[in-house]
Amino acid sequence: MDTPNALIQGLDTANDIIWTYVIITILVGCALYFTWKLKAVQFTMPKEMWRLLTSSGRIEGKNDEQQKPISSFQAFAVSLSSRVGTGNLAGVASAIFVGGPGAVFWMWIMALLGASTAFMEATLAQLYKRRNPEDGSFYGGPAYYMEFGLHRRWMGVIFAVLITVTFGMANQIMQSNTLCDALGDAFSISNFWMGIILTFLTTIVIFGGIQRISRFCSICVPFMAIGYLLLALTIIVMNITAIPGILKLIVESAFGINQVAGGMVGAAIMQGVRRGLFSNEAGEGSAPNAAAIAHISHPVKQGLLQALGVFTDTLVICTCTAAIILVAGLYNGDTDGILLTTQSIEQEIGPVGRWFLTAAIFLFVYSTIIANYFYGEANVRFFAKARNMKDRMPVFIFRIISAIVIFLGGVMSLQTVWSIIDICMAFMVICNMIAVFELSPKAFKLLQDYREQLKQKRDPEFHKSSLTPEEAADVECWE
């Protein structure tokens, strides 16, 4: 056996063991616990989530002329732009191809439960966020609440390495390759030149800093999501009589009720959990990096918006993709991934579907590349701070490395990338969920404070003076 194949097989074996026996237990167990302790916040506060979403374009809290504040909606858009990507187009198709229609059901379950986990990690990211002295903007994420909340810098460094490798490099290669393949095929352009174009377009945004990244995402994400939803709804309406049968098929396949799906229950659960996490990122520790940048009056506000982001990603957009694929009925063939989604759309609405999906792929994947870069940058800043360095030069170097990685992704093979992403995601989940679980009492306390202020008909505000002196010493930005 040659070395590359042995490496791939070794990674796949490790992934199967970790995901089957460790990750599912951690994610489901913690999500159930958080849902109980938070009094099912993801189900009991949808009205408040919607209120925050419709009013989150404004800047809250104190700011001065030196600051360049980022609104809650802009932070929500950055995290959603990472969530809404190839996981919604190729990931759902792969989950159905491998695990059958039942995988969709388990993606739903992970979203419903995982929204509580997304709430927890985003709230903690807000509580322990830090301020950039150069422009007054905020940054934070799991590495920061590991260092300042748990006082374990070593743990933060490990997580920062994992997320930088996963999102700043491996994920970027996969996203770039997907985009270059799709656009190169559509426009008959070589992957080399598509890689050059994509690299140029990416550097224009990332060299503008988080302000430019957040503005780009706040414009791009609503546009791409609404456009894709309109396409999906058109196909669903055209096949409305088939929808009840599809829903029945999803549920039956999830539990092996019919004979055909009986042997696929395990595969359905595995694919639903794994690809569901890849899509909505709840518990993974990536979205909190975006949640931390918002300028808001209470940490819980961003927690509620991030829970809503999980619902938007999985229950809405992923479900639309699943409906298109199941209506077309091509999932039992030999086609997997983005090609399955493309062929399904093309079968339903003709050749125009290929062009529409090509545009959707560009917006979905390009916005994900931008958000993934930001996750890497936030953790490069953590490295610099851990070594008492100014972060300007490390960030500049990371931007150059990112440009190189994006170009290489357009021209290289994906032979080992998925395996690397899966195993890095697994260790990110383990590291992040340990921290979130240990810090969970603080998030529970913040939600209780938020609910009490709502009962008093007040727009909730948080100040660290409400914490004990020991707790307040670790909090920087909530005067």
Image: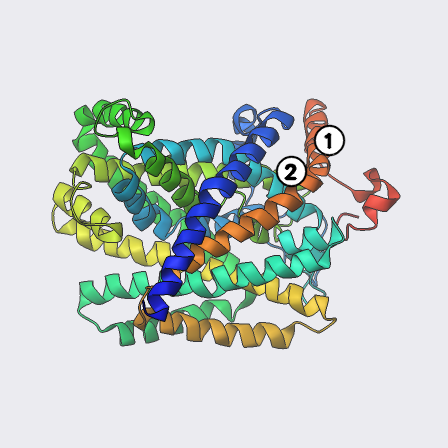
Numbered label attached to residue 449? 1
Q: How is the image coloured?
A: rainbow
x%, y% of residue 111?
45, 35
- Asked if one can make out residue 141 in the rendered structure from this viewpoint, the answer is no
Q: Are marks 1 and 2 in contact (CB under 8 Å)?
A: yes
The three-letter amino acid code for the residue at tag 2 is Val
Q: Quadrant of residue 311?
A: top left
Q: Is residue 397 left or right of residue 86?
A: right
Name the quarter where the N terminus is drawn: bottom left
- Asked if one can make out residue 448 in the rendered structure from this viewpoint, the answer is yes
Residue shown at 61%/31% (left/top)?
34
Q: Quadrant of residue 60?
A: top right
Q: Residue furthest front?
A: 1
Q: Relative to 241, does residue 461 appear above or below in the rendering?
A: below
x%, y% of residue 286?
54, 52
Q: Nearer the viewer, residue 323 or 453?
A: 323
Q: CA distance from mark 1 to mark 2?
A: 9 Å
Q: Secondary structure at mark 1?
A: helix
Residue that numbered label 2 is attached to? 300
Residue shown at 50%/50% (left/top)?
426
Q: Nearer the viewer, residue 274 or 141?
A: 274
x%, y% of residue 260?
21, 29
Q: Is residue 144 left or right of residue 355?
A: right
x%, y% of residue 210?
56, 62
Q: Nearer the viewer, residue 419 or 475?
A: 419
Quick one: label 1, few (<14), some, or many (20+) residues within 10 Å? some
